Amino acid sequence: MNLLIVEDEPELSKSIAAYFHQNKFTCDTALDFSSASIKMSECEYACIILDISLPGGSGLELLRRLKRSGKAEGVLIISAKNSLDDKIEGLELGADDYLTKPFHLAELSARVNAIIRRKNFNGNNVVVLDKLIIDIADKSVKTDRGFLELTRKEYELLLYFASNKNRVITKESIIDHLWGSHANMADTYDIIYSHIKNLRKKLQDGGCPDYIISVYGMGYKFAVSQLEN
Amino acid sequence: MKLISRYNRYIIPTLTTLFVICIVTSYFLIKNVLQHELDEIILRTKSRIEKYADSSGRMPSINSFSDQQIKFEKITVPLKDSGFSSTTQFIPEQNKSHISRKLVCSMPVKNELYKVTITEPLEGTRHLTILIVKIAVFSIFFTLLLLLLINRLLLSKLWSSFYNSLDLISHFKVKSPDVLQFPESSIDEFILMNSHFKMAAENAARDYQNLKLFSENASHEIQTPLAIIRSKLDLLIQDEGLTERQSDLVLGAYSSVSKLSRIQQSLLLLTKIDNRQFADNSQINLAPEINSKIEEFKELWQNKGITHSAEIQESEIQCNKQLMEILLNNLLSNATRHNIHNGLIKIKLKKRMLEISNTGAEQPLDAERLFSRFYKGAVHGENNGLGLSIVKEICEVSAINITYDCQNKMHSFTMNW
């Protein structure tokens, strides 16, 4: 699957590309308005990551052009401006999601994956992750031994892992993902730990290997065979 | 002390003293003039007596019905102490003594020497003195009264534009976008003052705007580098070859970046609230909002062994929905973060009142500095000290009054609107 990263800051653009590249994405990058405009009209992408403030024009204008030309690509806006107006305008113009800088790459990956899933399967989609079958529409998880009884948080956690498989995910990014940035406090680390513990146990009870590896001090990694998609 | 009172304080004693001096001086001057007149009368009488004695060779017989008294006495040696003196004279008709002028002189008639004594009462001066005192007292009284009235009425009218300007400048806020409109004045000093006030206010407002713009821009500019640092660290931790020591270093950097980005987001939020970027208010029914927040926090509380009690009645508030959510979040996070193990959180919602209290440290917080930016209590290094200033700022823009109180280790924040 190919992505277009429209971001004027080359270092950030490189990081995003590197992260998605590890997740088997092909990434195209555009550093300014005109090159983005050309790439958007010439190629088809699974998803476009779009920065609003660009040299040569506004990302919102690119979005407007894209929608006018009738393209159905998913668009994720990333912006330094955490302004509600920008967010509303972006979403009204047809963007699928909005993320404020600075973000965790894992979060970006989760959002992009969610957009792609929605676009590709029209809401009725299933993610297969080694022995796990996650039904996004039903929010249910199945193994060959049957359905897993997961709490809402455990399900979200699993889906977050699924979007970032074989990547180290920091505890901070998990907290931000599950509770939003406001609940960021030392106490939450314990809760993460207990959620992970419960999820791990439920997965193993369902006949799965121990997917969740804790990475010293930093966070967790959901390790599945690289051959799986 | 008011300027007018200070002015009166100087002017009234000065004027009174001046009046008293004038009265005393005029009294003596008038008395002198009268005395001089009297002395002349006495001298004229004396010269008549002399003339009579010269022509007739004897003293005249005294037959006076006036108060002037003349006495002759034969003496042998000429008088040494001749001249005018003041004395008292008894007037039988009035049955009282009067201050009088007396002339004593020796007068030779033929071969004999006489002592002549002429006394004349100073009756008129007494009435005159009383009159002068009366006039003086009345004039002092009326002048002062008039002065006070003039001060009160005229001066306060004159100074009114001054007080208006003062009032205006005292209500001036750098945050407010309105330009100060000082009252027109025809007095040069006030015109000058108003123009200086206006200039100072405009400078302050402009500086404030610049500062605000600067902090907003700075916050935005920081975001991109922060995003880059975080993304690089996100990539770095994917490296499986990291040693434990390297992991530690990366971890330290990572958590600091997280902290930095939270501070930056909080500052940006403060700036936005300041800029009134959350203007769209709506009527919010608080009860469901709070109940859903309690649901959100329940997990955290269970984990920390915190029990909560909620006393929730229907209550509505006119506020921005986003800000209200931030407000509740911050207050509840605070109540959680600063709580003790197996502590308690109490939430009480009534009509136009919300109270959130929690168990915590024994020492009450510094109520003065509690809401100021980057205030940190004694223990926690985790928080950035901006949560409560955001709360305060939200309360300010939403016309909510918030107070802090601590009793029996229960720290409570009460909001009224």
Image (tube, helix red, strand yellow):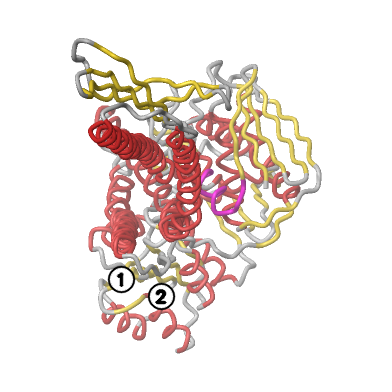
Q: Position of residue B256 (x, y in %)?
A: 33, 37
Extent of the magenta region: B391-400
**Residue sitting at 70 percent across and 49 percent down?**
B289
Judge the density around disc 1: few (<14), some (14-19), many (≥20) Cα neighbours within 10 Å.
some
Indicate the amino acid at tag 2. Tyr
Tag 2 subunit: A
Relative to residue A45, is residue B122 depicted above or below? above
Q: Secondary structure at mark 1?
A: strand
**Which residue shows up at 75% across the image and 30% down it?**
B309
Q: Is residue B156 left or right of residue B108?
A: right
The answer to whether residue A109 of the structure is visible from this angle is: no
Sequence-wise first label, 2 or 1: 1
Residue A223: numbered disc = none
| Closer to us: A44 or A49 | A49
> Do badges 2 and 1 share one subunit?
yes
Q: Is residue B397 visible?
A: yes
**Where does label 2 land, which residue?**
A45
**Vertical order, A83 against A215 (above or below):** below
On screen, A41 above or below B305? Answer: below
Q: Nearer the viewer, residue B385 or B70?
A: B70
| Chain where mark 1 sits | A
- In-front residue for pair B168/A83: B168
Residues A202 and B96: in front is B96
B222 left or right of A179? left
* Residue underneath mark 1: A28
